[in-house]
Image (cartoon, rainbow, N blue to C red):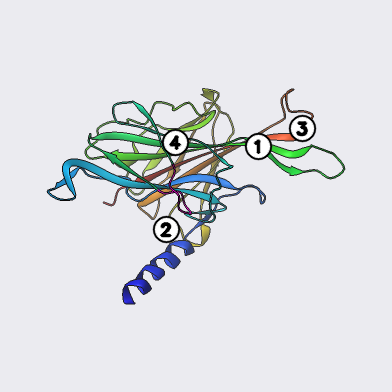
Amino acid sequence: MMKNFKRLFQIVLVLCFCLCLSTVAYAHTMWLNVTDYSPKIFSHPKYAPVPRAKTVVYFGWGHRYPVADFLSDKYLGDFFLIKPDGSKEKLTPGEGGFRAVEIKEKKEGGMIVAATITPGFYGEIKKKKDFYKLRYAQYAKALINVGKVSGNPFSKPVGHRLEIIPLKNPNELKLEEWFEFKVLFDGKPAKRVKIRACSLFSFAGKSFTTSTDNNGKAKIRILDYCGPWIVKATMQLPPTKEFKDKCKELSYTATLTFAVPKT
């Protein structure tokens, strides 16, 4: 009973320190959570006879980081892993509420877990049949360092239309330092994109807000907390010719989750 109480207390504690991720009240956001962003390679005669590292990835969906709602199959698009050797592996989400999936790796290096939302329309406007407030597309990445990692193995884009690229391996960050990154849209620097970021342990939804410069770059300062962080980029554009008769605007969102090591 005491064990269950402690687990409940931990869950409540985590949920108290969350960030309101939505820049608009009606939009859900997708991100990826990881139980261990820096798993070590280990072996055990019974449980791990072949040396490997292990971690678990699960989906965040809604308005509050780290967890808020359950992601339905109808929303999930691509879900894949970029391994340390650069190869790409399709992932199958788990059957539970947060679609958790276990990832095992035998080699040291950087791994990227990536996911997308199937694009769709939201907010049908009254008296305008088949016309909506927006068409949305969302992209998420999580950065994982397996064992000892040198340099920045996360500098190569995975191909998302809107994507956050770290200019430094977050595993090398320390408190008070700046974490710099660039945002790409269709492979080019994305100017004046809105940025929000926070630590898992930010009190009362405290977050860092900024925007990208003319080179698509932005930075946040790692204040107060180590551990998991999330960065969110949002971009709104007028509808293209293809969608001008279907919606008022195009909405793109990208999230990046990572961990700053404890010093």
Name the residue carrying label 4. Answer: 114
Bin the neighbour count of mark 2 within 10 Å (Cα to Cα): few under 14, some 14-19, many 20 and up: many
State how far apart marks 4 and 1 are (Cα): 19 Å
Q: Residue at x 28, y 52 (%)?
A: 262
Q: CA distance from mark 1 to mark 3?
A: 11 Å
- Please tell me whether mark 2 sits on a helix, a strand or a loop: loop
Are circles 4 and 2 on residues that touch, CB within 8 Å?
no
- Residue 246, labelled with which disc? 3
Check if residue 97 falls in the magenta segment. Answer: yes
Q: Nearer the viewer, mark 2 or mark 3?
A: 3
Residue type, mark 4 in image: Ala
Crowdedness near tag 3: few (<14), some (14–19) or many (≥20) residues, C-alpha within 10 Å: many
Q: Position of residue 32 (x, y in %)?
A: 45, 45
Work out whether residue 45 or residue 81 is closer to the camera in this orientation and state it: 45
Q: Earlier in the sequence, mark 1 or mark 3?
A: 1
Q: Earlier in the sequence, mark 2 or mark 3?
A: 2
- Closer to the chain start, of discs 4 and 2, is 4
Above or below, comparing residue 99 to residue 189 in the picture? below
Q: Indicate the quadrant where residue 38 lies.
A: top left
Q: Which mark is residue 201?
A: 2
Specify which label sits upstream in the sequence, 4 or 1.
4
Query: Can you tell which quarter of the image residue 241 is in?
Result: top right
Q: CA distance from mark 4 to mark 2?
A: 23 Å
Secondary structure of the magenta portion, mostly? loop
Q: Residue furthest right?
A: 127
Magenta residues, start to end: 93-100
